[in-house]
Image: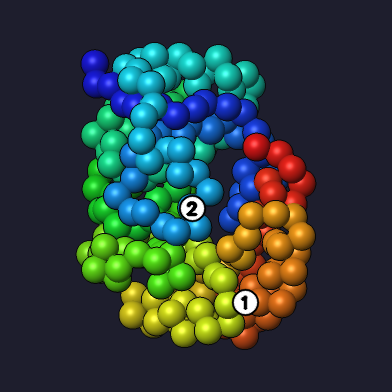
């Protein structure tokens, strides 16, 4: 039985994207192939508890209770693609809706058969990461072609609009599949940036805005 390194398993509400506000059980996996300067889960870059896929499944079922919505996050979950394939087969057999957070640098492969929604967050230059590391054109095209991906961009300043537009045009991303989210860490910062930067940019581009409910409302 394959094993993965788990940072945490918990039940909460999805804070971002099209499923914001939905109750879900969360699986946060260790390790990431990027080092974004503003990352709010740097604790996931290292460490974690090694668990077999079966033990992760049992822990998820126990934590979920009657909830049948799974959000896999990290770190970068697709670093564990082979292990996730095995786990998600189990979860789908139990009737779970599965969403996976990813930075879009790794190709989804067979996971497209077991994931209902990929929340792809390609990083902009505001992440402080070299474009060579943060943009994998083949992977992004795979996600677009899957028809199962939404694209969530973290924006920090008005000038970020040009980079978001580059992604939309370069990869023919449907605008109804694009979400803009503020780079913020406190409730006050989120409100100010949502109103001053993110919402106006979303209107300008004709795309969606998503709040960060876990920060605005104070849940995990």
Q: Is residue 102 above or below residue 156?
A: above
Position of 124 with respect to 138 (left or right) is right
Q: Which residue is mark 1?
A: 202
Q: CA distance from mark 2 to mark 1?
A: 22 Å
Indicate left or right for 153 with 132 as reference: right
- How packed mark 2 is, by other alpha carbons closer than 10 Å (few <14, some 14-19, many 20 or more), is some
Q: What kind of element bears circle 1?
A: helix
Question: In the image, residue 211 lies at what x, y percent?
Answer: 68, 59
Q: Badge 1 local density, few (<14 within 10 Å), some, or many (20+)?
A: many
The reply to whether residue 107 is visible in this rendering is: yes
Residue occupying image coordinates x 39% and y 27%: 48
* Residue ID for mark 2: 39
Q: Is 22 drawn above or below residue 59 in the view shown?
A: below
Q: Position of residue 208 (x, y in %)?
A: 61, 69
Residue positioned 58% across, 82% down in the render = 158
Q: Which of the 4 quarters of the picture holds residue 115?
A: top left
- Residue 84's tag is none
Reply above or below: 15 against 23. below
Give the mark nearest the N terminus, 2 or 1. 2
Of 2 and 43, nearer the camera is: 43
| 70 shown above or below 118 | above
The structure residue drawn at horizontal position 75% and vertical position 64%, both measured from the top left corner, is: 191
* Mark 2 secondary-structure assignment: loop
Where is the N terminus found, in terms of image quarters?
top left
Q: Quadrant of the C terminus?
A: top right
């Amino acid at each position: 039985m394959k094993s993965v390194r788990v940072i945490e398993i918990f039940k909460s509400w999805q804070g971002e994207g099209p499923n914001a506000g939905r109750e879900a059980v969360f699986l946060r996996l260790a390790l990431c192939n990027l080092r974004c300067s503003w990352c709010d889960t740097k604790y996931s870059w290292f460490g974690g508890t090694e668990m077999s896929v079966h033990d992760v499944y049992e822990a998820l079922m126990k934590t979920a209770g009657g909830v049948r919505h799974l959000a896999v996050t990290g770190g970068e979950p697709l670093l564990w693609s082979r292990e996730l394939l095995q786990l998600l087969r189990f979860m789908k057999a139990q009737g779970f809706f599965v969403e996976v957070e990813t930075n879009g640098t790794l190709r989804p492969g067979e996971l497209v058969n077991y994931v209902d929604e990929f929340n792809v967050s390609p990083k902009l230059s505001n992440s402080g990461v070299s474009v060579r590391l943060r943009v994998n054109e083949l992977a992004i095209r795979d996600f677009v072609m899957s028809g199962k991906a939404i694209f969530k961009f973290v924006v920090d300043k008005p000038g970020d609009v040009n980079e978001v537009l580059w992604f939309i045009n370069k990869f023919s991303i449907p605008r109804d599949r694009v979400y803009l989210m503020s780079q913020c860490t406190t409730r006050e910062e989120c409100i100010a940036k949502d109103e001053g930067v993110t919402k106006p940019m979303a209107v300008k581009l004709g795309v969606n805005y998503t709040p960060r409910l876990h920060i605005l409302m104070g849940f995990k």
